[in-house]
Image: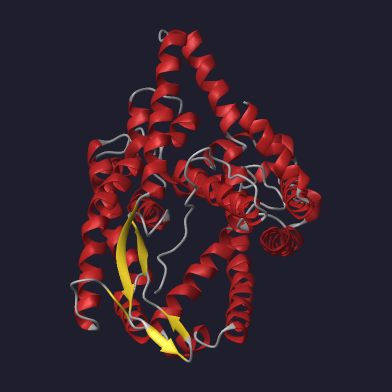
Amino acid sequence: MKKFIETIKNIWSIEDLRNRILTTLLLVLIYRVGSYIALPGIDANALTNFEKNSNQGILGLVNMFAGGSFSRASIFALGIMPYISASIAIQLLTIAVPYFQKLQKEGESGRKKINQYTRILTVLVTGFQASAYVAYLRNQSGGAIIPEYGTFFFWLSTTIVLTAGTLFVMWLGEKITDKGIGNGTSIIIMMGILARLPQAIIAEFSSKVAGSGGPILFLIEIAVFIMITVGLILLVQGTRKIPVNYAKRIVGNKQYGGVRQFIPLKVNAAGVMPIIFAQAIMFIPATAIGFATNSESASGFVRIFSDHTNGWYNLIYAVLVIVFTYFYTALIFNPTQMADEMKRNNGFVPGVKPGKATADYIGAVMDRITLPGAFFLALVGIMPGLAAAFKVNSNFATFFGGTSLLIMVGVILDTLQQIESQLLMRHYDGLMSTGRIKGRTAPANA
């Protein structure tokens, strides 16, 4: 406790760090307040059934990322998801399209152009999703729409407000990244998820006290939740270090190189993306075949993809997570580029020839460490379904793994790592008495 109090004092004594933390908290508060402001023309008291239906399937994922704004028909109902979708699309284009590859290599000017294209695509995606949201709102809870607004005017005003809301949330995220602490987009998503945790714990405790389990079963669930969180921290932090030696160079009277460094390869380089992709794929069959079918009366193929506690559902879901882990890792990880940069800087892996042999070696190491990481990530992905199968409250079960817990752990570790860097830069002790927080840094290019 003494160490903790001393660390808080150190953080507060650094003016720049204090201002960044306060700025982050203020911008997050603005976002949370906005998530409770209903759209013009909506009667918030008539959204009971809409809130219930909006917490199922892929819509539940969207609602989670939006911090509950989706189910409340808020001005931030679409949250930051359109910006994330646009960012992923542009990221894939930088891999597949030569023009975007060229922009990526142009440095700061290229990055600005890519950001501009991302914003334009965000507006288009938000406009399309806003129109779909209006149609879904009319279908699920048409009684909540005030008749005086009129059909066309409500569609137009809602589309404009939702688009402006998403752009404002995007701006908040950029300001947090620039003026605050941590990655703004990730923090906004995490805060939306974290806001649901206290209510989920209270609901689970109430259900266990009122049921047959009692407080003992609730404490067991909390212990399991803590163990899963610890395992997820190990997954996020896990790295395999590849030693790299640099040849000595003498320029004038100075000697350069002759040192050993390491390339840290992440066990879970793909992050949360495989789980997001797998969840989207798993929802497609139920949407295409049986969206209008009652899940209670559904059978066969439709029931498998509608019930996340079903054994076949979890097996297919786990396989998809493993496949997407390898796929996304292959997209973001380029061993050939790393080997070429090492060669240009007179670096080499001990016992491995420079060039293609080094690229093959790094790729083989990455494949080996990705396998256990993919299996553990698949286990994390199906944990909410397993928890629900053991009669854990559906709201609390989502925190037993999957997207919610992985985002929370990753973002918190990343933010703490940035705070620790600020402390160490000013010659203060870090956040931990031994070692350092490694955060989610990408593999370093030699």
Query: x%, y% of residue 296?
Result: 36, 32
Query: x%, y% of residue 443?
Result: 40, 65
Query: x%, y% of residue 146?
Result: 77, 46
Colour scheme used in the picture?
Answer: secondary structure
Residue 33 shows in this picture? no
Residue 317 shows in this picture? yes
Quarter-wise, where is residue 324 in the image? bottom left
Q: Nearer the viewer, residue 339 or 252?
A: 252
What is the total number of numbered labels drawn onto the structure image? 0
Rendered position, 405 above or below 289: above
Quarter-wise, where is residue 390 in the image? top left
Q: Nearer the viewer, residue 310 or 178?
A: 178
Image quadrant occupied by the C terminus: bottom left
Give the residue drawn at x 42%, y 86%.
97
Rendered position, 161 above or below 102: above
Image quadrant occupied by the N terminus: top right
Is 28 left or right of 264, judged from the image as shown? right
Q: Nearer the viewer, residue 253 or 413?
A: 253
Is 194 left or right of 97, judged from the image as shown? right
Residue at the front extreme, as displayed: 253
Give the residue drawn at x 75%, y 41%.
43
Quarter-wise, where is residue 221 in the image? top left
Rendered position, 347 above or below 396: below
Give the residue drawn at x 64%, y 79%.
116
Query: x%, y% of residue 239?
Result: 35, 54
